[in-house]
Amino acid sequence: MTEGKSRFLACLAPLLWCALLETVGIEPAAAGDAYSITGSIAGPDGMWDYAAVGSTDNRLYLAQGEHISILDLGGSGIWTRIDLPGAMWHGVVPLDSRGLVLGTNGQTHALTLFDAKSRNLVSEIHTGIGPKSALSGKLAQFAVLADPDALLLEPKSGLVAAVNGGSGEVVFVDVDRRAVVGRARVGGKLEFAVADGKGSLYVNVQTAHEIAVIDALAFKVTRRIPMTGCLEPKGLAYDPRTDLLISGCDNGIAHFIIAQTGQSLVSLKIGRGADAVMIDVARHRAFVASGEDAVLSIFDIEDPEHIALLQTLSTEKGTRLGAVDPQTGLLYLPSGKLAPPIAPRPWPSVLPGTFHVLVVGLSHPSPDRQ
């Protein structure tokens, strides 16, 4: 491994990231701090999926139908986008150190690489559709369209993991070689996935109501963590400081688990229709966006033995995904007025001219921090 690549992987290690935050002086949020919707940014039309904030370029990346929308968070508020006609974008991850933007395209069943500056297509790496899971009912129509879906970088191996949500497997890609190098067969309908930085991936299995643990070096499932009382887990987040997993369940609860042991700590009430779970590592906060009840549940996770719901913030119907800026602690939550599906896509459409991003931040800091 080259010296440059070693530095690249080391900088992605979660524990080192936490140390960096402490070095630059980001303070944890105080118990009395309150969050509010501090702004709304109009954006391009289209239904949305996963979002991410770049670690160095101060941009919000959003998978949005046929294009990847990019918002400059540095003050200009200007949207740009990456277009690929006929695409169906689900996940997006900026690899700042490589100068790349990665997206998962469910239409071509590929992990697609773009040049971050020119926005030109660099490569398409086909992840395949894989063996079909035994999906039925409303989930069956998503089977092919969700391959691949969620997307993340596994720091220890340096591989990118693309989750084939419909066919129930995780595909490992070497971006440098532009090649699939491994597959982990999980089974069921897969949703969000996270990495612990030590070689393990955790992925929500919606149909089995569990978290599958994958050895990212051996490409195999090593154990499964059942989540009693959690139906259809979707959103998932990981806190490297405490080894805490947070899963958002469709039946209105957030489930908190110690990753290494699988110990279930507590289940707390959230809104219905939860999707993304977002985490602010520096300020010890977790956020669960629930689109059906139009609420954002905000948790204090500083001490895993005393996890608490701090606040339930009203948002807008359908607001269920988003991303946290790790530097500012601001949340960016895509939203819009939903309309019936437009064939052949089975999910809701968005009424033209209604898409926007809600900005959520601290509104009333504690007196000792003013």
Image: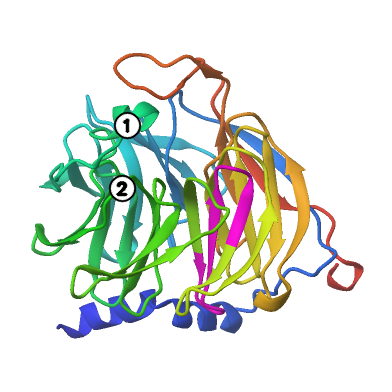
Q: Residues within 10 Å of mark 2 (few under 14, many from 20)?
A: many
Q: Amino acid at mark 1?
A: Ser
**Nearest the camera: 106 or 244?**
244
Residue 242 belongs to magenta span: yes
Work out whether residue 364 or residue 259 is closer to the camera in this orientation and state it: 259
Q: Which residue is mark 2?
A: 188
Stretch of the chain drawn in magenta: 238-255
Looking at the image, residue 165 lies above or below residue 303 = above
Q: Secondary structure at mark 1?
A: loop
Magenta stretch mostly in which secondary structure?
Answer: strand
Seen in the picture, residue 35 relative to 295 is either above or below; the reply is below
Question: Decide: marks 2, 1 in contact (CB < 8 A)?
Answer: no
* Amino acid at the residue labelled 2: Gly
Q: Residue at x 53, y 84 (%)?
A: 19
Residue 272 visible within the image: yes
Position of the N terminus, as image quadrant, is bottom left
Which quadrant would residue 223 be assigned to in this image?
bottom left
With 306 as the anchor, is 242 left or right in this view?
left
Residue 65 - label: none
Neighbor class of circle 1 (other Cα within 10 Å; few <14, some 14-19, many 20+) is few
Residue 135 point in image, percent of width and height: 30, 36
Residue topped by disc 1 = 136
Of residues 220 and 322, the one nearer the viewer is 220
